[in-house]
Amino acid sequence: MYGPNFATWVEVPTMAKGLCGAARPIHFRGVCTVLMKLFHISLANYAVFGAKDWQQQAIVRRMVADLDMDIAIHTRPTVRESDGLALSSRNVYLNSDERAQAPYIYQGLSWAKEEVKKGQKNVALLREGVLARWAKQIPAGRLDYLSVVDPDSLEPLTTINGSALMACAISLGQTRLIDNILLS
């Protein structure tokens, strides 16, 4: 993919700075560059991304729009285990105790969605509620982030007045798990 002396990168820096991008500062630059090359080589008309990697699909959607690429970006729902854990190749690295705690990630996000349905719009209160649940239910978890953002721009929100996405990354043991939910 990258020949000798490769010197060209494609990035959407504002959208890549938060969420997973904070811990992986050049990750999305690599994603955008590889996808740009693949889209160019394949002459793709559409690409499909999973909702679990929301930040990635949002960044790719923006790259495609900004560069006037004739590619439709489709987002498909996250596939989950019967207990709610988002499917990921990383799940095999969870030990039995970590695996037992992992479904509570989505349960916390789902609780927040229900609170929004009941009328809660205060992001700080939603975060506090989710974090309190996780403190009890996921004692082995190490929080990377729990954010509420605009699903298109990925800009942080303080109040929910329209579309909103709650996204998180939590490490259990050596396994970093990401998940999200559209709150409205």
Image (cartoon, rainbow, N blue to C red):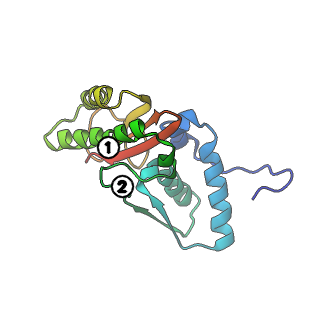
Q: Is residue 111 above or below residue 49?
A: above
Which amino acid is tagged 1? Tyr
Q: Is residue 176 above or below residue 44?
A: above
Is label 1 in contact with label 2 (beta carbons under 8 Å)?
yes
- 184 vs 12, left or right, is left
The answer to whether residue 156 shows anywhere in this view is no
Residue at the limit of the structure toward the right, as seen here: 4
Name the secondary structure under disc 1: helix
Count residues near mark 2 (Cα–Cα under 10 Å), then give few for <14, some for 14-19, many for 20+. Answer: some
Quadrant assignment, res 139? top left
- 28 vs 150, left or right, is right
* Res. 80 mark: 2
Q: Quick one: 181 or 70, which is closer to the camera?
A: 181
* Res. 158 mark: none
At 30% from the left and 31% from the top, the residue drawn is: 137
Residue 166 rendering spot, x and y as whole percentages: 34, 41
The answer to whether residue 73 shows anywhere in this view is yes
Count residues near mark 1 (Cα–Cα under 10 Å), then give few for <14, some for 14-19, many for 20+. Answer: many
Which amino acid is tagged 2? Arg
Q: Quick one: 82 or 86, which is closer to the camera?
A: 82
Residue 56 rendering spot, x and y as whole percentages: 51, 51
- Which residue does the numbered mark 1 point to in the structure image? 106
